[in-house]
Image: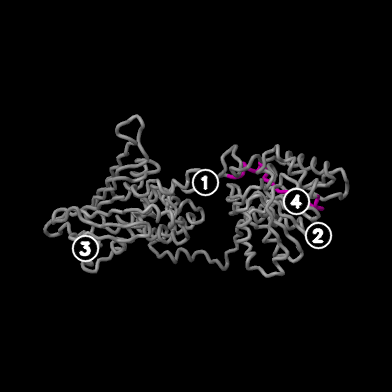
Amino acid sequence: MFLTISTTGTAERPATDLGFLLHKHPDNAQRFSTSHGTAHVFYPEADTERCTAALLLEVDPVALVRRGRGKGRGGAPDAALGNYVNDRPYAASSLLAVALSSVFSSALKGRCKARPELPERAMPLRIEVPALPARGGAELVVRLFEPLGWAVTAEPVPLDPRFPQWGDSRYVRLVLEGELRLAEALRQLYVLLPVLDDAKHYWVAPDEVDKLLASGEGWLEHHPEQRLITSRYLARRWSLTRSALERLELVRLAEADDTEVEEIDNAVDERHDTEEKPVPLAVRRRKAILDALRSAEAARVLDLGCGQGQLVGALLKDPRYTEIVGVDVSMRALNEAARRLRLDRMGERRSSRVKLLQGSLAYTDGRLRGYDAAVLSEVIEHLDPPRLPALEYAVFGAARPRTVVVTTPNVEYNVRWETLPAGRVRHPDHRFEWTREEFRGWARAVAARHGYAVEFRPVGPDDPEVGPPTQLALFRLGTETSTGTSTETSTGTSTGTSTGTSTGASTETSTEADRSTGTTTAKETAA
């Protein structure tokens, strides 16, 4: 991938001053090792009137796969090939941005020991990138660079010039012309190259917020596309994006009041801040399940579809549970659960209380008989409806624990999630989501067929119109009646402060709904 920086000059201000700013002598061709290949810096032209510095990055596809996340990684059948055959060596991206910060680090920071006055001087610049990925097209390129004072040329690159009917690719040839300080120009490129590509090659950690704000100082806080830039740069990690936007707003307010950011930030005294933080729905679900298990006086518990072991971990903290068994069809999920629970480092006394088993809930399993309670949290909605009778018999007919706790989303509540499009379920793997009437009809029929009584509890804020976000059914074997007469209870609260749990089975999925009230962790589907 290739980038050139050009400037013009006069006898009084020669163009070769660019070499001082970049800390690279125009008479030398230099090479630098990077984590993903080799960067070359050379000057195709360098005289008093015109000087051009070129950065050529040779990407090693093997190093890219070994050290970071190349394009094409994922679950597709050709993902392995996609790691090596992609546009990373040719198109400007986060790889080039990292090379810029490494090779031109002093220029990026606005430092020049030989000529300290140069970094503060605006100079005529022409920056050219022959192949730039632009998710959003040439129009977005203009929207990002034009407000920064650049004259922008963004020419779409055709898929194949021989076949114009095929249209344009997602790449553009970019030319920026303007009079800016070199440090400003480099910092803008460092941020906006990966933003346009929209595919960082490395994991985005919290320290990326500091990098963004440092490079965006002086221009990002006022940019009309601030939110898009921030979200894309931080790989759409919502918590990091929110943190960055809040800090950018503080900078803007401080500038408007001609004061320091610290003075604005001190307006909120955290020691006396009594505003309640929203409790994540996953936490409410977990609490609701633990409350139900305590009321049943269960000691030996099955977590059917345990996923990554969130509920198993919560049960382990309470000594009243003497035997805890997590079951999941996914070996990958079980391995992750073992890692999270640190089973290999757990003391013998504690580890004797927990077991992780691979198994499908669509089949009877003799290992699951004789337990006090079983939990199916956020499981049934991951099954195709024709498979529900098999799960029903395996749990209620064959295993027959004294108590069964089932939680599932309430589809009626979906209208309260502002970020969830109408008609969409909360997670792409959900095969269905039931109304309160549908869930209660299913639960009552199951109870009647297998000799259980059932009661229903809301989980989360119990909306007077659409009910709670999660619905819970508590089955008790042979209590009150053997015909499964249901009893309606209201152990949750209308304010939603009472309940919550991890998804016990198919998964604690990270849904649009859960993100609105807190973050959850993805788990494997139950069957």
Name the residue beneath numbered marker 3.
20
**Where in the figure is residue 331, as x and y percent of width and height?**
62, 53
270 is higher (above) or lower (below) than 219: below
Mark nearest the camera among 1 and 3 is: 1
**Residue lying at 69% horizontally and 40% vertically, measured from the top left:** 434
**Where in the figure is residue 364, as x and y percent of width and height?**
76, 47
Mark 4 residue crowding within 10 angstroms, few (<14) / some (14–19) / many (20+): many
Q: In what element is the residue under mark 4?
A: strand
* Marks 3 and 4, the one that precedes in the sequence: 3
Q: In what element is the residue under mark 3?
A: helix
Q: Quadrant of residue 437?
A: top right
Name the residue beneath numbered marker 2.
297
Check the image and name the residue furthest to the left: 11
**Side of 9 where 492 appears, left or right:** right
Q: Mark 2 and mark 3: span between their CA atoms?
A: 76 Å
Q: In what element is the residue under mark 2?
A: loop
Q: Mark 3 and mark 4: span between their CA atoms?
A: 71 Å
Mark nearest the camera among 1 and 4 is: 1
